[in-house]
């Protein structure tokens, strides 16, 4: 193939997102003017999109939309802010300020752990935005690069057991995150009131118009695929020798979203391209991002992510271009294997003899409600604990590096706040995206429906003697698939209020996309279908056969081998 990639989309009209970036003066736009504008609680025009580059999304409470419309009021605008936290690690004492901010300045007074190992505040009024950025700066954090067309929060295996290797992997996730951050001074100027520096901004890696679309990266320590690497654009699988990471297998082009009815969109699993010694890690990260920057489709945002770039140019050409630009050759992929994705709950001692406690957080929502004081309990732990919190990609939290001295005190808090009451394996392995009321793209409930839905499924499992079994169950409120439903054994994807597509046949290690089983059905209908399938599974499964494998073996759905053809076919 001729190397004419720069001209591939030549002559086609660029998307409006490209105009916004080009005209933004390195992401400044007129955000400062909008901050002074007290007539509206929102951001206007291009600024609506530009604030995302600073880690914030403008939202409105969808439960109140109709009522406010009838009262001729503007929607109840408020911002969601997503923090940058590579590898999900944060000193516990910093949580005190985070918790305090949620209480004082957010409409919902909750904190939401995300499935990309960080946390979000929902419901920050425009007038309080500078407070959040200053609070984050005071504790050494920021929200740069957590939204829009940049490299997002870098994931890293949450594994406190093998902490030496984990520490090395974690250091790489921080280095990659820092390398790929936007360099513009706009964030510091606008939110931290730093003086405008009259030198020209320069984005050596991302470029003036940043990436064509969002970009996601992981650093993974096998055999645990807790980060769901196959859903990410760029992945570094650690190869370990003598207690040291010696290099990485590189996989590129994963992503899960699609559009209902649009067969030009499909989920895809990241593909292997080769092994590199550790010393080339940052070079390879930079080169891959630059190729996606240069080759990605800027004329159609639905065809812009790395998996489409690879489909447009071919994996071989993409790989050759990496080798050419980096001046190295990939070695063959080294052996690796995944055995699970779930978090290991409860108490565990790491190789430094410190204790670690993994707590289940339903949907990652840190809140106090009638029957559970999770937020207060976690705050109490933060006031005692001298180590870290580690947010997992499954929306849970690890209280890590607990000293012998503090173990007893933390155990008492866990007990008195009931932070680890009986939770089924089904529930522990479930996940939902945020969806209503804050997500503007939600088509059906996810987070708010999951708990009760699982209770009903737990009853079905109990009826067939399967109450101890694991099924990976995930719900997303729309086909953007934030809940990673398309890597679940049972995945629900919202179609409209109260209705979902039901996908089955993913596997436990997250290396297989499930296939549609029933389209556009109600929760009640889903439960009827699942009851039928679970009953047969209980009777006809091979020894210990997982649900996802069973439904494929029994031909309830066809296995997806190449999603480009099989996902819709
Ligand atoms: Fe997501 C957009 C929430 C992980 C694919 N996602 C959104 C927005 C910001 C809606 C919007 O654009 O206005 C949601 C905000 C809801 C709210 O009120 O908080 C949202 N996504 C989330 C989170 C919070 C879900 C969660 O419950 O944990 C996750 C935040 C991760 C983070 O900390 O960065 C989140 N989103 C994901 C994932 C899973 C992952 O990354 O492992 C995916 C699928 C993987 C992928 O990228 O293919 C995902 N989100 C999307 C998409 C589809 C992107 C695409 O490729 O087409 C959108 C819509 C878009 O970007 O246009 C989206
Ligand atoms: Fe919103 Fe859809 Fe993502 Fe759920 S999957 S958070 S509904 S964009």
Image (spheres, rainbow, N blue to C red):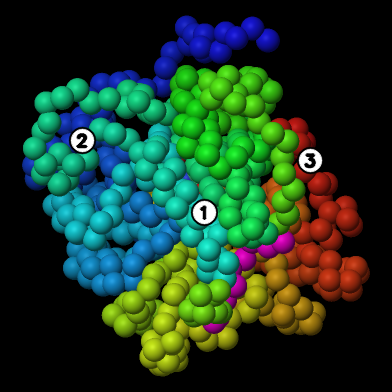
Q: Position of residue 192 (x, y in %)?
A: 15, 47
Q: Mark 3 highlights which residue?
A: 561
User: How many angstroms separate mark 1 from mark 2 (CA)?
Assistant: 30 Å
Magenta-drawn stretch contains 420: no
Decide if residue 363 is on the left or right side of residue 380.
Answer: right
Checking the image for residue 211, the label placed there is: none
Q: Secondary structure at mark 3?
A: loop
User: How many angstroms separate mark 3 from mark 1 (CA)?
Assistant: 30 Å
Q: Mark 2 highlights which residue?
A: 186
- 217 or 369, nearer to the observer: 217
Q: Mark 1 highlights which residue?
A: 169
Q: Earlier in the sequence, mark 1 or mark 2?
A: 1
At 29% across and 34% down in the image, what residue appears? 183
- Magenta segment, prevailing SS (helix, strand or loop): loop
The residue carrying pointer 2 sits among few (fewer than 14), some (14 to 19) or many (20 or more) residues within 10 Å by Cα, namely many
Q: Secondary structure at mark 1?
A: helix
Magenta span of residues: 339-347
For the residues bearing labels 3 and 1, Cβ distance under 8 angstroms: no
Q: Earlier in the sequence, mark 3 or mark 1?
A: 1
- Hey, which quadrant is residue 132 in on the image? bottom left
At 60% across and 40% down in the image, what residue appears? 277
At 84% across and 71% down in the image, what residue appears? 544
């Amino acid at each position: 193939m001729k190397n004419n990639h720069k001209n591939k989309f030549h002559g086609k009209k660029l998307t409006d997102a490209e105009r916004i970036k080009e005209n933004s003066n390195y992401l400044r736009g007129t955000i400062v003017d909008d901050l002074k504008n007290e007539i509206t609680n929102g951001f206007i025009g291009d600024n609506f999109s530009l604030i995302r580059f600073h880690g914030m999304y403008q939202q409105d409470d969808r439960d109140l939309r109709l009522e406010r419309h009838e009262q001729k009021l503007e929607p109840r605008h408020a911002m969601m802010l997503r923090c940058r936290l590579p590898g999900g690690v944060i000193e516990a004492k910093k949580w005190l300020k985070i918790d305090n901010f949620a209480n004082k300045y957010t409409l919902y007074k909750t904190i939401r752990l995300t499935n990309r190992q960080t946390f979000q505040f929902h419901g920050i009024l425009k007038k309080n935005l500078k407070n959040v950025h200053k609070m984050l700066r005071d504790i050494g954090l920021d929200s740069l690069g957590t939204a829009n067309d940049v490299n997002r929060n870098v994931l890293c295996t949450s594994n406190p057991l093998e902490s030496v290797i984990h520490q090395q992997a974690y250091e790489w996730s921080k280095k990659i995150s820092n390398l790929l951050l936007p360099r513009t001074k706009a964030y510091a100027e606008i939110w931290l009131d730093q003086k405008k520096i009259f030198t020209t901004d320069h984005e050596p890696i991302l470029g003036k118009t940043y990436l064509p679309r969002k970009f996601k990266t992981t650093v993974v320590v096998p055999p645990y695929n807790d980060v769901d690497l196959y859903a990410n654009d760029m992945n570094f699988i650690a190869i370990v020798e003598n207690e040291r990471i010696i290099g990485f297998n590189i996989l590129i082009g994963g992503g899960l979203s699609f559009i209902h009815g649009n067969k030009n969109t499909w989920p895809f699993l990241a593909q292997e391209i080769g092994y590199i010694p550790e010393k080339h890690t940052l070079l390879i990260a930079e080169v891959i991002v630059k190729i996606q920057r240069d080759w990605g489709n800027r004329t159609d945002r639905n065809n812009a992510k790395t998996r489409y770039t690879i489909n447009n140019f071919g994996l071989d050409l993409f790989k050759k271009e990496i080798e050419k630009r980096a001046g190295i050759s990939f070695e063959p992929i080294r052996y690796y294997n995944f055995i699970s994705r779930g978090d290991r709950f409860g108490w565990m001692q790491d190789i430094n003899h410190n204790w670690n406690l993994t707590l289940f957080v339903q949907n990652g929502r840190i809140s106090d409600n009638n029957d559970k004081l999770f937020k207060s309990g976690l705050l109490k732990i933060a006031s005692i604990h001298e180590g870290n919190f580690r947010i997992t990609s499954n929306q849970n939290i690890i209280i890590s590096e607990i000293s012998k001295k503090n173990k007893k005190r933390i155990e008492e808090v866990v007990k008195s706040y009931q932070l680890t009451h009986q939770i089924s394996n089904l529930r522990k392995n479930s996940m939902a995206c945020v969806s209503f009321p804050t997500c503007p793209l939600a088509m059906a409930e996810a987070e708010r429906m999951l708990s009760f839905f699982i209770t009903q499924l737990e009853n079905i499992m109990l009826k067939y003697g399967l109450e101890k079994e694991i099924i990976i169950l995930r719900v997303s409120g729309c086909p953007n698939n934030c809940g990673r439903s398309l890597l679940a054994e049972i995945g629900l994807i919202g179609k409209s209020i109260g209705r979902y597509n039901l996908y089955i046949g993913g596997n436990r290690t997250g290396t297989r996309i499930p296939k549609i089983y029933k389209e556009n059905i109600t929760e009640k209908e889903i439960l009827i279908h699942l009851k039928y399938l679970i009953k047969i599974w209980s009777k006809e499964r091979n020894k210990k056969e997982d649900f996802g494998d069973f439904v494929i073996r029994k031909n309830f759905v066809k296995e997806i081998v190449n999603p480009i053809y099989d996902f819709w076919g």
